[in-house]
Amino acid sequence: MPTSACCCGNWKRRNARFGGDLRPDDRTDARVKRHDRHGRALAIALAIVAGYVDAIGFLGLGGYFVSFMSGNTTRAAVGVVRYAGMATFGFALIASFVAGVVAGSLLAEATDERRKSATLVLAAGILAVAAVIGHFRVAGLVLVPAAMGATNAVFQRDGQVSIGVTYMTGTLVRFGQHVAGALRGGDRLGWLPYLLLWLGLLGGGILGTTLYPFVGVSGLLLAVIAYLGLAWAAPRAVES
């Protein structure tokens, strides 16, 4: 069989597993659009909390991230060459984040329809422990990425995360693609949900930075309260 025919066959089989002949970008949009207005509002609220937590973590850890693992990977890579301590701490944060993703994903699969509330309670619990320990020892903040990783399972379904709420690179890519589509005569407002998510993270980061001089890492407890409140409201969010 010619190579091109084989590749075409493999592509069609992969598409079939995703439920139709959709381009990868179409699948991403379909996963976002299946949420009702409550679901999208929940995603924006979680992005705000994530930005708030990331700003406090960034300031508390002296320039490391608690939800942006690409940045920590770069710091770890630089540390491998120049300073082993930087590399070790960067890898520890990344491991914490991945552990949170694993825990959140397993819990989401086990709780099914209650997965949003369950994963938010898990994230709140981890964050509370991190805040208490971090108040006395900065090393306690290593637990914060685990809470951020678990948070992404809120919008997990069938093993796929439909909306990432603690990282925005992909969101900005989709925003730019939809702006280009609008300029070509496509959906004029298709970019708006992605812009709102990014603005949520930005606004949360500004809030966290503003409050940090007054509350320090104890400000994470405000995020715990926000998570618990969102856990209570989460069942209203419906997916089609």
Image (cartoon, rainbow, N blue to C red):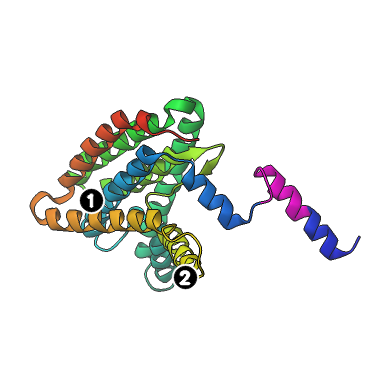
As drawn, the label of residue 138 is 1
Mark 2: few/some/many CA within 10 Å (<14, 14-19, 20+):
few
Quote the CA–CA distance across marks 2 and 1.
48 Å
Front position in the image: 100 or 112: 112
Q: Residue at x 65, y 44 (%)?
A: 18
Residue range highlighted in magenta: 10-21
Q: Is residue 79 above or below residue 47?
A: below
Q: Secondary structure at mark 1?
A: helix
Question: Is residue 20 on the magenta stretch?
Answer: yes
Answer whether residue 167 is visible to the viewer in this image: no
Q: Secondary structure at mark 2?
A: helix
The part of the image, by quadrant, that contains residue 201 is: bottom left
Would you name the residue on which mark 2 appears?
183
Q: Residue at x 39, y 53 (%)?
A: 193
The part of the image, by quadrant, that contains residue 72 is: bottom left
Front position in the image: 38 or 112: 38
| Residue situated furthest front in the rendering | 185
Q: Earlier in the sequence, mark 2 or mark 1?
A: 1
Q: Is residue 77 above or below residue 50?
A: below
State whether the magenta stretch is mostly helix, strand or loop: helix
